[in-house]
Image: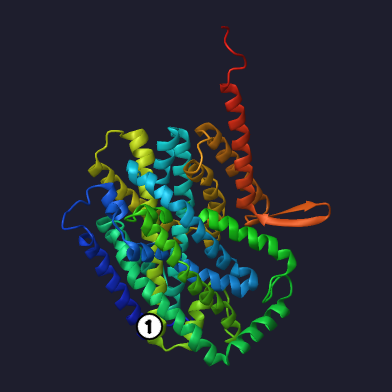
Amino acid sequence: MDGQIHWTALAVFVFFFALVTVMGFLASRWQTGGTKKEAHLDEWGLGGRNFGTWITWFLVGGDFYTAYTVIAVPALVYAVGAYGFFALPYTILVYPIVFLIMPKLWHEAQKAGHVTAADVVYGRYQSRPLELAIAVTGVVATMPYIALQLVGMEVVIKALGLTGELPLAAAFIILALYTYSAGLRAPALIAFVKDLMIYIVVLVAVVLVPSKLGGYGHVFQAAGDAFAAKGGATGLILHPAQMLPYASLAIGSALAAFMYPHTLTGIFAAKSADTIRKNAVFLPAYTVLLGLIALLGYMAYAANLPIKNNNDVVPALFNALFPPWFAGFAFAAIAIGALVPAAVMSIGAANLFTRNFWKAYVQPDVTPAGEAKVAKIVSLVVKVGALVFILFLPTKFALDLQLLGGVWILQTFPAVVFGLFFGWFRGPALLTGWAVGLAGGSWLAFSDGIKPVHTFLINGTNFTIYTGLIALVLNIAVASIVQIALSKKATPESRPAS
């Protein structure tokens, strides 16, 4: 962070970045069965729906645990202490949800050739307005998520001593080119390297960093003293008032996680429903990794690092305590950790635009090759849009929009999931519930200054709950009321005369 270029670290970084770039361009020939079928959206956007257990494990883990996760989770723990660990119960709760819901959703998509969640919704309810609502929500919620991957990459590029926007722009241009060429196969192949590197970095860090700082006892003591000096709601354990928001954040985030287009893209690309069930069993291994990553936030206190921006915690720790070659390796792992999810996110957004806007409204008779061509072009536009966003607007805008995106994407849950288990709801009721949940959640978020939780005062007691969960309850309640009203309207009030 001293403004000097760290040449050894930079050389290691460039080597691994070049390695995954070559892999990205070669990926177009991988897992194709010897045929050239990429001129089809199933092939380009879903990898031919042929990814087995291990490929799916790396791909879903790669786009779920992102570069921004590696940067932001320790930064949050550094800032607020125990409250920042809400990501752990969230990633524990999400996998039973995946095990229960996603195989059914995969079956429905596979049977009808659906590529997106909005395809599934239209196939089930035959409602173009509801389909468009799900598609627009997915695209809007994804854009700031891609921008935040750029934030993660920007942080490590700065830690290498590079300045200006050119390195970041060059990295994303390379990403755009090989994603255009290879589609989902590129991030799927690169995810193998990314996850292996992240595991090495984190395991080395959680063993060696405490040994350099006097052990975990000293790490927790230093963090505890720092939080005590700060006062407020920070600390090594949750305060009673934090328990309800902590739990509701975990539950709401778990329900929302696999509604995002990028996570559903990984699900739809799986070879079978059994592949998804196996992944729901094995993916919690990433939760262990996430817990270890979060501890880096405490280690920064023991290292007495001069942190000006919370996002600098992890790069500053590695620069201070590791030799330059390992710091370069760690920064490469984080940067590559941005490429995988950013690629999948742009592909998911492009699939939504192509199937649920272009094909639905602009060119209904578009050929499979035409769909793939449109999706490739849109994936480039999405990446460029995210790059422009992060270069010319304050990072806080991306953070605010990502928080809102979580509230918004959660409102698609009833339309996407409920029909898998019961057929009572109809399109108009779900669309009304979505609109009220979206508007109500947005209003609460803005009234609270774009915070993820809202506080109710009931009988003199404060109850703080995740805003997205409040909006979801409102969504379901309104959808239920509208459906009851529609059902009564459709039921004859009197028997016909005999």
Looking at the image, the residue that sits furthest to the front is 498
Q: Position of residue 355 (x, y in %)?
A: 35, 41
Q: Is residue 491 above or below residue 456?
A: above
Query: Can residue 491 be seen in this snapshot?
Result: yes
Drawn side of residue 495 relative to residue 141, left or right? right
Q: Quadrant of residue 487?
A: top right
Residue at disc 1, secondary structure: helix
Drawn side of residue 319 relative to residue 166, left or right? right
Residue drawn at the location 62% of the way across and 17% of the way down: 493
**Quick one: 24 or 497, which is closer to the camera?**
497
Q: Amino acid at mark 1?
A: Ala
Q: Is residue 237 above or below residue 273?
A: below
Q: Is residue 1 above or below residue 442?
A: below
Q: Provide the residue designation for mark 1.
A: 9
How many dots with numbers? Answer: 1
Q: Position of residue 295 (x, y in %)?
A: 56, 78
Residue drawn at the location 57% of the way across and 87% of the way down: 303
Q: How is the image coloured?
A: rainbow
**Dot 1, how many residues are within 10 Å of its Cα: few (below 14), some (14-19), or many (20+)?**
many
Q: Quadrant of the C terminus?
A: top right
**Quick one: 23 or 97, which is closer to the camera?**
97
Q: Position of residue 21 (x, y in %)?
A: 28, 68
Q: Position of residue 290 (x, y in %)?
A: 50, 72
